């Protein structure tokens, strides 16, 4: 397998991986948060990567172009502030939200981060890779706070992203009511966007089920339904890169098989 190409958006590392095959033409784009955790165990902050290249390689039997994968590294101390759904929180000041540790008092930076993805990071990738301009060919994904950031991306730039892949979405960063407000910001289901949600049942993931159920109900009331929306529960799994790596092939297969020709 080819190695990711290291680029930079300001001080942020950006890894771009282009599959190696005989295909000549524009490819789908998978843009992911926490880019340091995607490709190499040595780069991952937890010693185990998502092994995204290996997951993509399992999709060759689909007989369609494999995606370019772009990983935007997080910035460490401001990660939660950048991944926060800023307008959700600021437009509902009566609803509490909270982050962990020292990031609790960091100003929210979610809008600036989302703009950086659109205005700098995707254009960087397009300089070295032939990427499809079609909205339905572009997915954005991440886990935990990265799940929130992926859903938020769809509310901010629905003309760019066709699918949000939200793994172990960290609904605990806000109230159940705030989560429902979040759903109100999504584009209409009739516009054809697609959503993937999942969570485990152990450790931190075990706390997500109640709020995810409320989100599923709110989505259904606004016309979102299977197969446009997937909400999976992986019994016996927790909150880690190794867990997300194990289910990534299934998630990517769902995404690519759902792209219209």
Image: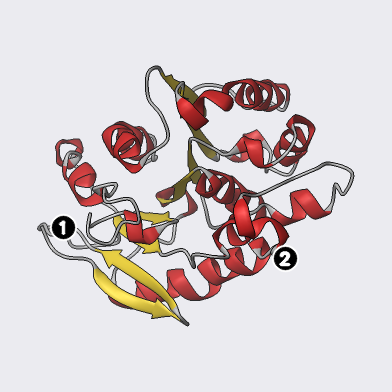
80, 88: nearer the viewer? 80
Applied colour scheme: secondary structure
The disc, 2 or 1, on the residue closer to the chain's N-terminal end is 1
Is 234 left or right of 169, judged from the image as shown?
Answer: left
Bin the neighbour count of mark 2 within 10 Å (Cα to Cα): few under 14, some 14-19, many 20 and up: few
Q: Is residue 136 visible?
A: yes
Residue 237 lies in quadrant: top left
Given the current orientation, which residue lies at the most extreme top position? 235
Q: Please tell me which residue is depicted at 45% across the width and 71% down the height of the picture.
A: 121
Q: Report the quarter where the C terminus lies.
A: top left
- Which numbered tag is attached to residue 23? 1
Q: On the picture, is 24 further left or further right than 177?
A: left
Residue at image position (75%, 35%) is 175
Q: Quadrant of the N terminus?
A: bottom left
State the residue lying farthest toward the right: 94
Label for residue 107? 2
Element type at marker 2?
Answer: loop
CA neighbours of label 1 inside 10 A, class few (<14), some (14 to 19), many (20+): few
Q: Residue at x 61, y 40 (%)?
A: 191
In front: label 2 or label 1: 2
Spot occupied by residue 239 in the image (x, y as percentages of width and height): 42, 35
Asked if residue 150 lies left or right of residue 175, the reply is: left
Marker count (numbered): 2
User: Helix, strand or loop at disc 1?
Assistant: loop
Above or below, comparing residue 218 to residue 71 in the picture:
above
Q: In the rendering, at what x and y percent does residue 150 appear?
A: 54, 49
Q: Is residue 260 above or below residue 198?
A: below
- Which mark is on residue 122? none
Report the residue at 22% width, 66% height from top.
Answer: 4
Label 2 – label 1 distance at C-alpha: 44 Å
């Amino acid at each position: 397998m080819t190695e990711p190409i290291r680029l930079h958006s300001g001080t942020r590392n950006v890894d771009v991986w282009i599959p190696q095959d005989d295909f000549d033409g524009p490819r789908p784009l998978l843009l992911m948060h926490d880019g340091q955790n995607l490709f190499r165990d040595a780069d991952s902050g937890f010693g185990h990567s998502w092994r995204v290249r290996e997951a993509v390689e399992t999709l060759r039997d689909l007989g369609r172009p494999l995606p370019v994968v772009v990983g935007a590294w997080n910035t460490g101390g401001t990660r939660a502030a950048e991944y926060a759904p800023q307008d959700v929180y600021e437009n509902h000041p009566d609803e509490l939200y909270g982050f962990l540790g020292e990031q609790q008092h960091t100003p929210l930076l979610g809008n600036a981060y989302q703009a950086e993805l659109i205005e700098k990071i995707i254009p960087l990738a397009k300089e070295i890779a032939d990427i499809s301009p079609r909205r339905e060919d572009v997915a954005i994904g991440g886990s935990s706070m990265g799940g929130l950031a992926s859903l938020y991306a769809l509310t901010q730039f629905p003309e760019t992203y066709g699918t949000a892949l939200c793994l172990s979405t960290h609904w605990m960063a806000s109230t159940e009511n705030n989560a429902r407000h979040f759903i109100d910001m999504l584009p209409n289901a009739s516009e054809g966007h697609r959503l993937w949600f999942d969570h485990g049942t152990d450790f931190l993931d075990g706390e997500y089920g109640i709020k995810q159920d409320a989100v599923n109900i709110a989505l259904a009331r606004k016309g979102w339904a299977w197969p446009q929306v997937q909400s999976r529960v992986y019994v016996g799994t927790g909150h880690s890169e190794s867990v997300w790596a194990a289910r990534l092939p299934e998630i990517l297969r769902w995404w690519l098989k759902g792209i219209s020709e």
